[in-house]
Image (cartoon, coloured by chain):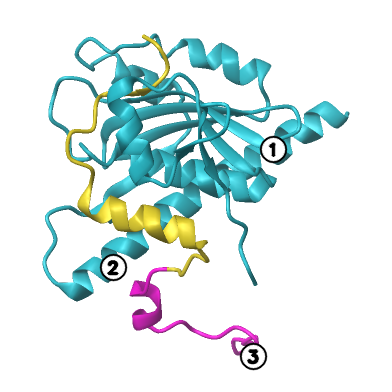
Chain colours: A yellow, B cyan
Amino acid sequence: MHGVIRNPHIRKRSSAQENKPVKVELTASQRRILQVLATGIEGEPDVLAGRP
Amino acid sequence: MPRERTHLRYQLYRSRARTLAATSAAQLQHELELAGPTDIDLSQVRFDAINAQALDACERWEDPHFLWDEVIGWKAKEPLSLDIAIWFEEELCGLCFANPNNSRQRIRIVRLEGRPREAHPLKNRIAALAVSAIEHYAVIIGSRFIEVQEPLEGAISIYKRLDFYEDAEGRLVKTVESLVS
């Protein structure tokens, strides 16, 4: 019986790392969009672009 | 087969833009939760293509303003276009179609609609979510501007909250910033 050969380059991730969201690199403009997203924009109409 | 390669490359770009938008929303949710309790769980937001599942869910919308199945034909004709179905868990809350011009310098938001008439979990957040995904796509393909095609009067103020402005020719546009590394 052979023992399990482990790849020394593969590290087991901790559960704390797994629960942490992946960080996305954002422009300043994208960060501002997220600030607006957090609160929402009151009175947003259903149709936002295009002519029905 | 350059056309086929372009088609596949942009399919990857679209997918990446949608994934980045969803990850950004989840990241925002994480930050909001660190600050205190929140009234919405933005980690449940999903961005997908306008596919058969989205069209099926759209059929259950009460009196939508557009025939969204037209988008299937547009997607075939415009390989660089970006179609977005905005979901909250299993509920379809918004649909969007945007298309870059030939030079890719400008992406036009051709259609954007939130689920009409009925309340939904992403009410008042559809424009921000759609613009977030489109802006990720714009950064990926190197566009300089996002433009709203035919914005209705009541929607202009919404876009201005998202950094859109009227350019010298009266078009409602937003300048795309590039990532500084």
Q: Which mark is residue B30?
A: 2
Name the one closer to the observer, B46 or B164.
B164
Within-10-Å neighbours for mark 3: few <14, some 14–19, many 20+: few
**Could you tell me residue B130's position as x and y percent?**
41, 39
On screen, residue B141 above or below B147: below
Q: CA distance from mark 1 to mark 3?
A: 46 Å
Q: Is residue A1 visible?
A: no
Mark 3 belongs to which amino acid? Pro
Mark in the foreground, 2 or 3: 2
Q: CA distance from mark 1 to mark 2?
A: 33 Å
Local SS, label 1:
loop
On screen, residue A18 above or below B145: below
Left or right: B126 as drawn, with respect to B138: left
Left or right: A51 as drawn, with respect to B176: left
Q: Which residue is mark 1?
A: B105
**Could you tell me residue A4's position as x and y percent?**
59, 86
Left or right: A17 as drawn, with respect to B136: left
Magenta-drawn segment: A1-21
Residue drawn 67% across the image and 30% down it:
B80
**Could you tell me residue A14's position as x and y percent?**
40, 84
Badge 1 or badge 2: first in the primary sequence: 2
Local SS, label 2:
helix
Q: Which mark is residue A8?
A: 3
Q: Is residue A22 visible?
A: yes
Name the one closer to the observer, A4 or A52.
A52
Name the one closer to the observer, B56 or A46.
A46
Query: Which chain does the numbered disc 3 sit on?
Result: A
